[in-house]
Amino acid sequence: MEGVSEIKLCTNGLESVECGNQNAPLMEIGLGNYGCSHYRRRCKIRAPCCNEIFDCRHCHNEAKNSLESNPLQRHDIPRHEIEKIICSLCDTEQDVQQCCINCGVCMGKYFCSKCKFFDDDVSKNQYHCDECGICRTGGEENFFHCDKCGCCYAKLMRDAHRCVERAMHCNCPVCFEFLFDTMKDVTVLPCGHTMHLECLREMEQHYRYSCPVCSKSICDMSNWWRKLDQEIASTPMPAIYQNKMVWILCNDCGATSHVQFHIVAHKCLNCKSYNTRQTQGGRDASCSSGMSEMVS
């Protein structure tokens, strides 16, 4: 039926199943012994773009986009255009299908005919999302597709996330890897922007607590703001600066405030956040520089 993904799971049982006219025990041959660092599978793919054979699309993309390759010839594989695969057990080249036409082995316990995707590790709970147009992991029952964000999120986020149009159709703002089909864990910040979880952890290790895209705070910073209150109270400004006023813009609430200048940081009069930037008047004193000195 058009519009319905043809996703199948080969059974693990000993009962006979129809797949290449072979029984289940035969389909277990070679299970877990073939594949690459990305996937366990019992087939290779012929890339339609360069007609070369690779274990998977990631192997192709890494090889063709390496620093050693010709910059003019770098490219990604058009995954949905793959037409030929090669059985890893008998080396038979054939059209894309789950079971080998020659030896009958199941080349991937998880198989998606739309993505031309094979994987023997079904513990990932793979599923195909028609709206995303690709296969994802984690179990279809645990995710929903957000039409505005253009990607699948955990159901716990259905009424809790801030929608950003095509939020995942961009590069990670830290490492610049494309997020939509990344194999790494992705996190959604309170502002709705997305990035790799490991990149977020690295930011936190360097005391960076604002979104690299919009500069909004990425977590509850109230404890830090209280520490800054104490730091400012214990750091009186010289007399020449005590009457100096500056305009600031709050990165968290967007409000502008006219506040007394201080070398450490400036506090938003609307939401009490120190995640602010100076817009007019005197020396630029940002929250980030003051916070880095406090926690280093």
Image (cartoon, rainbow, N blue to C red):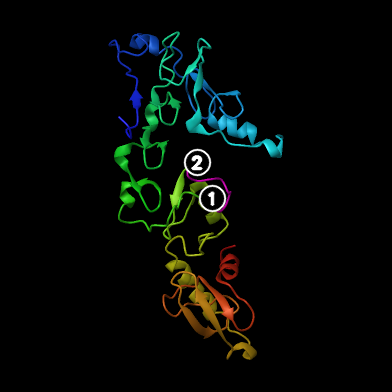
**Residue 216 in picture, x, y percent from top left:** 48, 65
- Which is the main secondary structure of the residues drawn in magenta? loop
Magenta stretch bounds? 171-183
Say which mark, if any, is on residue 59: none
Look at the image and tell me in which quarter the C terminus lies: bottom right
Q: Quadrant of residue 111?
A: top left
- Give the residue number, with chain letter if any, for mark 2: 182
Q: Nearer the viewer, residue 149 or 205?
A: 149
Say which mark, if any, is on residue 172: 1
Q: Is residue 264 above or below residue 113?
A: below
In the image, is 164 to the left or to the right of 75? left
Q: Nearer the viewer, residue 184 or 233?
A: 184
In the image, is 75 to the left or to the right of 192? right
Mark 1 or mark 2, earlier in chain? 1
Look at the image and tell me in which quarter the N terminus lies: top left
Q: Is residue 102 above or below residue 76?
A: above
Q: Give the amino acid type for the residue marked by disc 1 in the picture.
A: Cys
**Residue 29 in picture, x, y percent from top left:** 43, 11
